[in-house]
Image: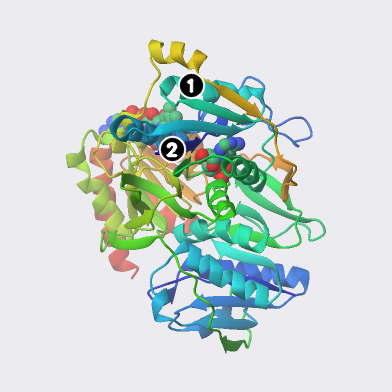
Amino acid sequence: MSVVVYAETSEGNFKNTALEAVSYGKKVAEQMDLPLIALTVNATNPAELSRYGADKIVKINHADLNSFNAKIFAGIVQQVAERENATVVVVDSSSNGLYLAPILAIKLSAGYASNVVAAPSSIHPFVIKRKAFSNKAFSHTEIKSDKKLIGLAKNSFGVFENPTTANEEDFSPEICSSEVRSTAINKASGNVSIADADVVVSGGRGLKGPENWGLIEELAAVLGGATACSKPVSDMGWRPHGEHVGQTGKPVASNLYIAIGISGAIQHLAGVNASKVKVVINTDPEAPFFKAADYGIVGDAFEVVPKLIEKLRDFKAQNS
Amino acid sequence: MKVFVCISHVPDTTSKINFTENASEFDKTGVQFVINPYDEFALARAMWLKEKQGASITVISVGDASVESSLRKSLAIGADDAIRIDAEPTDGLFVAHQLAAVLKEHACDLILTGRESIDYNGAMVPGMLATLLDWNFINACVGLEIENQTATALKEIDGGTETLSATLPLVIAGQKGMVEEKDLRIPNMRGIMMARKKPLTVLAPIAIESSTHANRFEKPAAKSACKLVDASDVDGLIALLHKEAKVI
Ligand SMILES: Cc1cc2nc3c(=O)[nH]c(=O)nc-3n(C[C@H](O)[C@H](O)[C@H](O)COP(=O)(O)OP(=O)(O)OC[C@H]3O[C@@H](n4cnc5c(N)ncnc54)[C@H](O)[C@@H]3O)c2cc1C
Ligand SMILES: Nc1ncnc2c1ncn2[C@@H]1O[C@H](COP(=O)(O)O)[C@@H](O)[C@H]1O
């Protein structure tokens, strides 16, 4: 028996979410007294995973697997899980992880819990804590089936070093066919995505119009962060859909979330509750966001933000 | 073309979330339930396929009689008929099995769902349903065209979008972008009158165990008060973020 983690790569490199999933897998493996097996596809440096506690690294290298396909990748994780007799399988919550997990759950006949934020509180019965009600609550969920599939929420457990000497093993899985073909990938180059960002700078209707978004973009650039917005801002077409944060938009689980000219409606806050530190800049001291934030400035964005950009530039110059 | 739209009946986005005394169940008292917001985008896209390409639409939901308000609203928006599977939706796997059992008995080209339901946030029913039916699945859809049994879908990925192409039948889980916010449908009086005469079939569930169980709920810990910094003191804010919060 074993715990198997699928450690996703992006252009051959492990994302933070993959390392977090391996760190989490290690914890579960220790609790269950089982070996931790990490599975990678086309990784440049698979050995890196031994630093986070993998006892064995199963390496798959195949030219056909350079682009992600949910059905094919679910089939691969299934084969490794079955080969290693996995009782627990862990995947991350990248958009690919979220896509393949429900397919994998059926293929493995595993009970699946998504949005998991902590190591099991008990192994018999197997109980984990997961987010529910759009970050307004947590659920302590028991997975009753023999095999268990865990979708780990981003930035919830952390990345921990746990050096081991791992065996590496090559594996050639069967690659199933998929009728879903990818014909184009459109990524805004250079920009940090909300899913990957440690810092997210978000603007609301208080910014008055799309012509003022330079402020948000500049602040995000200084902090190496991503830009985001409230729902009405994307509804009005000031910003693309992909940037709308909230209960009906993107969830943000960054270390720092800066909300500028956003009132803090319940639906918006649901999407940012999982961020570690929240800062609000708003002219209205009564804006509900002040109740949810850690730090706040009551002030006009058009005065405060340019100053903040300037001072942060100085700060970054001194601290880098 | 026959389209099924899966409707999840969820607490309105403004709802305060409370639990029953021993925290074992969601407290529905005073809570208004609505069509899951993502499912509204799926339904609006289905309506577009109906009007432009002559598709017929069945809406389907797993739940007790209370979900019929969301099904009736879907009929008023323009779905042709509705099916309710009479069972408490205990978890994603359970719901997927119930839907699959009914869909195996019906001719269908396309199943549209939401990306996730905003109550238990499983994001699992659509992918499970597709796999149980042995159909292909497209997730996080933000644009959809169908021509000659071939779907071209725009899918959101981390940091951008991907264009996918596949032949029907398909399960597609969507979100905003499938239609624009302004193209969401609101039922009109005529629609509401007509909905009363449209068929709503209630089916018995199949016997199946759920694989997970929510034993207990918990609300996030109350957070400490917001520290206010004077608007003239952005240096003070930077110092707090650096030294205290350690996020920059
Ligand atoms: C079903 C449903 C789902 C929804 N889902 C979401 C969701 O997922 N995400 C989301 O964001 N919303 C969502 N909403 C909308 C939500 O209810 C709010 O309407 C929205 O979040 C408000 O956006 P806002 O804060 O940008 O605008 P407003 O509420 O108009 O707030 C603007 C703020 O800017 C401040 N301001 C004005 N001028 C300045 C200035 N010069 N400097 C600084 N501050 C200034 C004002 O004091 C005010 O607080 C949803 C609503 C519904 C009904
Ligand atoms: N009880 C249900 N009845 C019908 N469809 C559902 C039900 N629950 C979820 N769905 C569909 O599956 C999607 C994803 O839900 P979930 O997997 O619960 O996050 C929803 O947007 C609905 O389209």
Q: CA distance from mark 2 to mark 1?
A: 20 Å
Residue B232: x %, y % from top left: 30, 42
Name the subunit of mark 2: B
Name the subunit of mark 1: B
Q: Is mark 2 within 8 Å of ligand 2?
A: no
In this rendering, position of residue B35 left or right of residue B26? left
Q: Is residue A208 above or below residue B189?
A: below
Count of marks placed on residues: 2
Residue B21: x %, y % from top left: 77, 30
Q: Quadrant of the N terminus of chain B?
A: top left
In this rendering, position of residue B136 left or right of residue A87? left
Q: Amino acid at mark 1?
A: Lys
Decide if residue B32 is in sight here. no
Numbered disc in front, either 2 or 1:
2
- Give the residue drawn at x 64%, y 46%: B97
Q: Is residue B231 above or below residue B123?
A: above
Q: Quadrant of residue B96?
A: top right
For the residue carrying disc 2, how many other residues have a C-alpha within 10 Å: few (<14), some (14-19), or many (20+)? some
In this rendering, position of residue B231 left or right of residue A289? left
Q: Helix, strand, or loop for circle 1?
A: helix
Residue linked to disc 1: B73
Q: Quadrant of the C terminus of chain B?
A: bottom left
Residue linked to disc 2: B2
Q: Is residue B121 above or below residue B19?
A: below
Q: Amino acid at mark 2?
A: Lys
Q: Is mark 1 within 8 Å of ligand 1?
A: no
* Foreground residue among B214 and B167: B167
Single out the residue that lies furthest toward the right. Answer: A124
Q: Which colour assignment does the render follow?
A: rainbow
Residue B185: x %, y % from top left: 37, 25
* Foreground residue among B169 and A156: B169
- Give the residue drawn at x 63%, y 43%: B101
